[in-house]
Amino acid sequence: MRTKCRSLLALLFIAPLLSQAQPPSTHSPLIVTGIGKATATLDGTWQFHTGDDPTWASPTLDDSAWEAIQTDKSWGAQQHFNYNGYAWYRRHITIDPITDAKLDLSLYIRRIDDVYELYWNGTKIGGLGKMPPGPVWYIAPPPQTYPLGKAQSGVLAIRVWKEAPASNASGLLGGLMAPPRIGSSSAIASYADDRNYGWLQSRLYIGGLVILYGLVGTLSLLAWLSDRSRKLLLWTAIFAYAPLSLQLLGGFRIPIPYTTSLAWQQPIFALQDISLWFLLLYLLQLEDNPRLVRWTHILSWISILSGSLDGLMCLIDPTGPLAHFAQATDAVCTVTVTLPQVFPLILIPFAFKKRHSIATWLVALFAFLTEMISVVRIASQQGSRFTHWTLAQKIDTPLFTIHHNPFTPILLSYTFLFVSIVYAVYRYSADESKHQGALEQEFKSAQEVQRILIPETLPPLPGFAVTSAYRPAQEVGGDFFQLITKSEGSALFILGDVSGKGLKAAMTVSLIVGTVRTLAEMFDDPAEILSGLNRRLHNRLQQGFVTCLILRLDPDGTCTFANAGHLPPFLNHHELNVPPALPLGLVASASYDETTIHLNIDDRLTLYTDGLLEARNATGEIFSFERLQQLLATKPDAKQATDAAVAFGQDDDITVLTITRLATGVESTTLLEAPILIASTA
């Protein structure tokens, strides 16, 4: 009897607890209390139905037969794995008590995947995106707030559409990703502000990192624009701009359509990989390996074309007739973009054959780690809704958090890669600047040599007016001229052009000027001087050559000249007929003929190098013989002729000599313009 009494008492005691522990009916309304300064979470069990019917927005609809679902996670993570298309959520909400009849309510939606519409008591109050046909949804939509009007109880219905899964879709997404919140408009606004502030806090590190990437990209681009030969700086700029661009397209809650964002992201991802390959190519000093360079270009084209095609597939309507074709193409393009990402595995072993600094090896190490993490992450995502691999999620899981900023493996690898690249580029630029400084010193020395070799003034020639102008295209030039007076009153004019430009040509000029002055003391005939100069230059020009014209001018106006492959002079505005001959330095036994003419009073003889004739304007048009004849018909002096070519578009060294015979009693003049010492362009 006592046992029965005790059992009855226990049952009476436990019964109320059991009744409290029973789950509420899925059709029972959610009672929200305390609406005012606080907000309430619309969590718990909601009614859920796949498919689509406009009548499901009605508050009088009997949804008791609908299935139950939770709103704290997506439908894909519950009983609707890999479902796409339409679905509806419904929840009966009782606002109790309503203490202020004038109170306005608002609804806060954190995220719904992908397109949604909201209905409050059968009336549409808003939504985000556009339903099919021609659906529009967003890559990183910010949370939204919707006004519900005056405080009252009712039914909240949410119509959702989710896109068809891509090749990397996990099947775990879809629908509500977090419960909505309800409250007074002021309370919801305050809650939204707190959430936005927390989100900004969590993005401080990655935001600062991509800004630094952008800064480095801008500095590298400006440095490259000032010196286009430093290709490492160009690839650094492209690589640095990529993370900034990707974040702007999908990391900062900018409401960019999903398809548009992916259409741009795919080629940017490819450019990021390509720029990293070229960075390694230059930092590891492998650009002298033609096979590696060729494969880098081949893989770059494969990557950028596949990435661009993959991006274009994103623009195809997922509900249209080409949707399946776009999905298949997406899978193929993903493979062709992902496989080349292992290219650093090929580059790095070649680098072991060279000696590199620690900074360079750090870049190689972190580039390898970053690429491999990316490859593994992308590869594990492909078909994950079938394989159920979770490696990608683990890679995206933060290793630790600092002041609400999560640090994932990929973020850490990009951080270390960024630091190592900045340091390596700094060291590379410092070494290049040091090397450039040494070259500038060599150029300065060459300038000084040329300044000594080319006279600052010309000696007067009785009965003649002589003008000369010399304008090198670079710091030092390959043109040369000399005026050497002889004891019997005659004078030798030597004008020539060394193949090539820059320091090498300038050093050859030094050799020629010294040699021709020596020969001029031994011989009077231009042909003999050319023959001697040719023999001394043979096999000393490293496959180069020299054109040269030597003219002996006698006091009575007799001109005797010999030509070695140089442009014939002009008498007034007519070109003289000069026998053809080989340039200097090609054949040791070459011989040269002499031609003699006579200058009358006011005749002008013009000698020039090909820089005058081949001046080129911005459209690629050359100065040409026709323009030269028109110019010389105006009887310009050397400076005027040179200035005309420079104004047209100087492309090579320009040297011009003019010799005019004067009438008896007219004072002879000589005029020289030779701006040899040019300021450094560094």
Image (cartoon, rainbow, N blue to C red):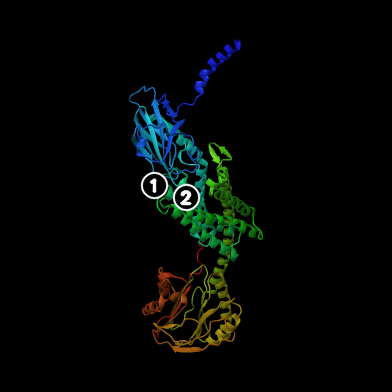
Query: Quadrant of residue 391 in the image?
Result: top right
Tag shown at residue 529: none
Measuring from the top left, give residue 42's x and y in whole percent: 44, 30
The correct choice, above or below, for 634 with respect to 4 in the image is below
Give whichever of 584, 409 is nearer the camera: 409
Mark 1 vs mark 2, CA separation in Å: 25 Å
Amino acid, disc 2: Ser
Q: Which mark is residue 135?
A: 1
Q: Is residue 426 visible?
A: yes
Q: Nearer the viewer, mark 1 or mark 2?
A: 1
Within 10 Å of disc 1 (Cα), the crowding (few <14, some 14-19, many 20+) is some
**Where 220 sits versus 644, above or below?**
above
- Rendering quarter of residue 464: bottom left
**Residue 380 picture location, percent across and down:** 56, 48
Q: Nearer the viewer, residue 324 or 202?
A: 324
> Which of the pair 650/602 is nearer the observer?
650
Q: Residue furthest front?
A: 1
Figure quadrant of residue 466: bottom left
1 and 2 marks in contact (CB < 8 Å): no
Q: What residue does disc 2 label?
A: 245
* Quadrant housing the N terminus: top right
Give the mark, 1 or 2, whose residue is nearer the N terminus.
1
Q: Kindly tell me whether residue 288 is visible in this rendering.
A: no
Helix, strand or loop at mark 2: helix
Residue extending furthest toward the top:
1
Residue 136's spot in the image, x, y percent?
A: 39, 46
